[in-house]
Image (cartoon, helix red, strand yellow):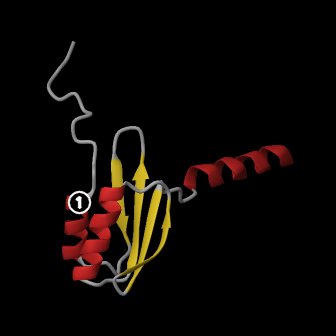
């Protein structure tokens, strides 16, 4: 019985653990921490945005089978969020739209 409880806890942790593929942390417009393989163009774009409009906060990038999602901390202004979305190299052409066999 104890084994089943331990197994359930392990599965719960694996499913609900916060596992972004990239993390960027900014403080007052300076990049202070980065994790993951961040594309050079995206990194340069984020640094440029932070230099022009200094902000503090975290940007996390999550990927599942179907999409890549950006998640921002609450301290990142909405105008900065939109600019970062604009420089993010998303995979726009990977979906098959309107084609069925």
- Residue 1 at least partly seen: no
Q: Is residue 18 left or right of residue 89?
A: right
For the C terminus, the image quarter is top left
Q: Residue furthest right?
A: 2
Please tell me whether residue 27 is drawn above or below residue 101 in the rendered image.
below
- Residue 50 at least partly seen: yes
Q: Residue furthest left?
A: 98
Rendered location of residue 77, percent (x, y): 25, 79
**Disc 1 packing (10 Å; few <14; some 14–19; many ≥20):** some
Rendered location of residue 87, percent (x, y): 23, 60
For the N terminus, the image quarter is top right
Q: Is residue 32 left or right of residue 13?
A: left
Dot 1 falls on a residue whose secondary structure is helix
Q: Residue drawn at (17%, 21%), measured in percent from left and top? A: 99
How many marks are shown on the rendered structure? 1
Which residue is nearer to you in this view: 96 or 22?
22
The residue singled out by tag 1 in the image is: 87
Give residue 28's quadrant in the image.
bottom left
Q: Residue drawn at (46%, 54%), measured in percent from left and top? A: 37
Q: Residue drawn at (14%, 25%), measured in percent from left and top? A: 98
Rendered location of residue 52, percent (x, y): 22, 81
Rendered location of residue 78, percent (x, y): 22, 75
Q: Is residue 93 left or right of residue 7?
A: left
Q: Residue furthest top?
A: 101
Please tell me whether residue 45 is drawn above or below residue 28 in the rendered image.
above
Q: Residue drawn at (22%, 36%), measured in percent from left and top? A: 93
């Amino acid at each position: 019985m104890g084994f089943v409880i331990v197994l359930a806890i392990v599965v719960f942790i694996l499913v609900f653990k916060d596992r972004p593929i990239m993390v960027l942390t900014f403080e007052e417009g300076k990049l202070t921490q980065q994790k993951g393989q961040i594309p050079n163009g995206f990194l340069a774009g984020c640094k440029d945005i932070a230099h022009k409009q200094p902000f503090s906060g975290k940007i996390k990038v999550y990927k599942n089978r179907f999409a890549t999602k950006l998640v921002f901390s609450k301290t990142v202004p909405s105008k900065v969020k939109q600019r970062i979305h604009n420089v993010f190299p998303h995979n726009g052409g990977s979906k098959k739209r309107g084609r069925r066999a």
